[in-house]
Image (spheres, coloured by chain):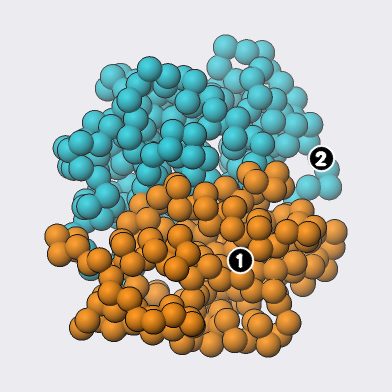
Chain colours: A cyan, B orange
Amino acid sequence: MNFLEQKIIEDGVIKEGNILKVDNFLNHQIDVDIIRQIAFEFKRRFRGKTVNKILTIEASGIAIAALLGDLYDVPVVFAKKGQTANSTDDKYVAQAYSFTHKKMNNVFVSRPYLTANDKVLIVDDFLADGQASKALIDIVHQAGGEVVGIGIAIEKGQQQGGRLLREAGYQLESIAILESMDYATQTIVFRGQPAQSLHHKAERP
Amino acid sequence: MNFLEQKIIEDGVIKEGNILKVDNFLNHQIDVDIIRQIAFEFKRRFRGKTVNKILTIEASGIAIAALLGDLYDVPVVFAKKGQTANSTDDKYVAQAYSFTHKKMNNVFVSRPYLTANDKVLIVDDFLADGQASKALIDIVHQAGGEVVGIGIAIEKGQQQGGRLLREAGYQLESIAILESMDYATQTIVFRGQPAQSLHHKAERP
């Protein structure tokens, strides 16, 4: 097991409905040490590649993107969802269905912040059906830029996003790939590994 | 002028309606060098204080909080707005009116991530009427924790948030305090300084 798989075993919780809850270190409370290791691991896996921009989507991708941007010393752009009242600029817009919020989101980036000169590393905390990643790729291509690769902390391997992105030829690097999980036994299978029992702490919600 | 005031002069744009647009380095595209300097400046201004948690609110505070959490090597928590479909835990909840989105938001933090042992540094990119800061303070107090201080990148000095927080006795450290700005002349006054003309780039939106 790598550091992130180990952390999932230690601190993750499987909720009913096949939901892996990792909001105590990844997407609500942020364990800076883990995010730092995720950033270093992405830098290692994409070594040799020229990257001049990191792209993610609000909100929980931002911490990973910020520490990775710090390592590469390149600008970070986070795509926004929906519309904001004080923004009327021209934007690159794509659509992504959010299974979490059960609605279609507009995903947008203001035009000045992505250009045809950009070699973009896309990062996010989760990959499931690939809706967010596909929207971000679409936006990079609208700008004429290049997608260098896609770095994901946790890929839900039983959903189609990872397969589709790899079949499309992208270098997709997922640090932990969940093959399956079981609520009743609180066990999880990472790709290529035997089943593991989570160290589920009963006092956690 | 300090580094952030200088950056605002160089890259900020005043839009109609007294809106300072800094989304090319702070809240859409992120200039990592500036965010890093903001984090170091907060660490310097709160030196001698014990901090064991950084608290911010999604989304644009997260990059600052992540780099500051990296400096302090403490966990970061970002408060969420609204409700999410896969979260039914007990939460600390407060309310904050968003002038940007013209609606009342629920702001919440899951209970396990703030405790009575926490000495919390609250950070955010902007402070205007103080709605978000007040909600975050309320949440820390609900948990029985201590607010060590509040670090803000850009305070709108002509709005009441800063005054109210200082009168309430909090150590509020704002790196740039806007006293006034003028759309027609694209000039800005930082607290205690003469008016400055923005280096407004005509080709920007």
Q: Which x, y percent locates residue A139?
A: 24, 43
**SS at circle 2:** loop
Q: Quadrant of the N terminus of chain A?
A: top right
- Residue A35 horizontal side relative to residue A204, left or right: left
Residues packed near mark 2 inside 10 Å, few (<14), some (14 to 19) or many (20 plus) = few
Q: According to the image, label 2 marks what residue?
A: A201
Q: Is residue A93 left or right of residue B93?
A: left
Q: Secondary structure at mark 1?
A: strand
Residue at the disc numbered 1? B151
Q: Name which residue type carries label 1.
A: Gly
Is residue A14 at all visible to an observer of this figure? no
Q: Residue at x 72, y 55 (%)?
A: B53
From the top left corner, tell me how far across and down residue A72 is, in percent. 44, 33
x%, y% of residue B2? 47, 64
Q: Chain of mark 2?
A: A
Question: Which of the two discs, 2 and 1, sits closer to the camera?
Answer: 1
Q: Amino acid at mark 2?
A: Lys
Give whichever of B101, B137 is nearer the camera: B137
Neighbor class of circle 1 (other Cα within 10 Å; few <14, some 14-19, many 20+) is many
Q: Where is residue B181, by image quadrant?
A: bottom left
